[in-house]
Amino acid sequence: MSDFSQSNSKSSNTKRMEDLIDKAFNATDYYDRVDAIKEIDDQEVLRKVAANDPDYYVRQTATEKIEDQDVLMQIALNDSDYYVRVAAVKRISDAKILAHIVLKSQEDYYICKDALAKIKDDDVLEKLIDEISDRDIMKTAVEAIERQSTLKKIAVGHEDFYVRSDALKKIEDQQLLIEIALNDEDYYVRALALEKVLDPEIIVKVAFEDQDYYVRNKAVAKIDDPAILAELVKKDADFEVRKKAISKIHDRGLLEQLLIDVEDHYILRKIKNKLSELE
């Protein structure tokens, strides 16, 4: 190709791009502006369109082509339209910028959810949990953590029992779960941990010894030994726990013996009802 032809080609391309940019800024129909933006890669042009176009779809289209993380952060934080903000979040990969967006956008759960889903740094997520004020967003942040050691730290040490509970749901370490099931100060956290404990001896220990009926009831639900269940019917102080134990006994002989051993009229009625079910 001659120098003259190359010059003409460059001139033609430049003219075409100038026309596209003019169209992106000035076309009356927003569809025409969108079509122009799809062919433009100039980051400054895209930034200006994303910041200033009156139509959300035009701004969204421009945002989907922007690469600068700081520019995207400003769009995610400041654009008036949800879909434009989401488009910006989806283009951001920097964990710290995403964390900043979460902290500044807590009035918008879904923006925070999308941002948290993109944070793969558990250290950033752990720090974020201490700074988030919204309960649902905090829960989503805990659920995004994958590293077991971080989850253990939160489950054992966080001041908010809801946060500890959320972390517990992702923990698989049996020794830690046992420790929490036996020792945590909050009954609900103990119960959650117990639900994941596999050791039958620990489950029985909790059924007989935990101070809270709710936790004991959860333990009874995991016990199948009829002799142990019968002992709980005789010894537990709470009628809900005893009722749960009765419901799991299918041995008529044991139930008939309980009619002799138990004095509580309500519990006796439950035993008789269970015997009737077995007829």
Image (cartoon, rainbow, N blue to C red):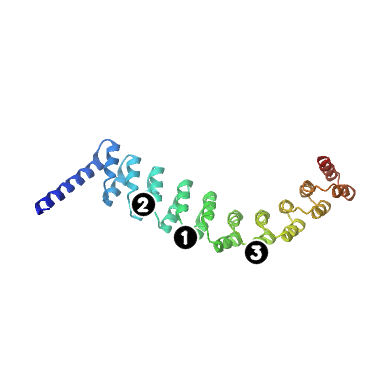
Q: Residue at x 28, y 35 (%)?
A: 29
Element carrying mark 2: helix
**Sequence-earlier tag: 1 or 2:** 2
Q: Amino acid at mark 1?
A: Asp
Q: Secondary structure at mark 1?
A: loop
The residue located at (56%, 62%) in the rendering is: 148
Separation (CA) of disc 3 from disc 2: 44 Å
Residue beneath disc 2: 72
Q: Mark number for residue 175?
A: 3
**Vertical comparison of 73 with 147: above or below:** above
Q: Is residue 171 above or below residue 137?
A: below
> Identity of the amino acid at label 2?
Leu
Residue 20 sits in quarter:
top left
Residue at position x 19%, y 45% in the image: 16
Q: Quadrant of residue 272?
A: top right
Nearer mark to the viewer, of 3 and 2: 3
Of the residues shown, which amino acid type is indicated by label 3?
Gln
* Foreground of the two, 129 or 194: 194
Please name the residue that numbered disc 1 is placed on. 121
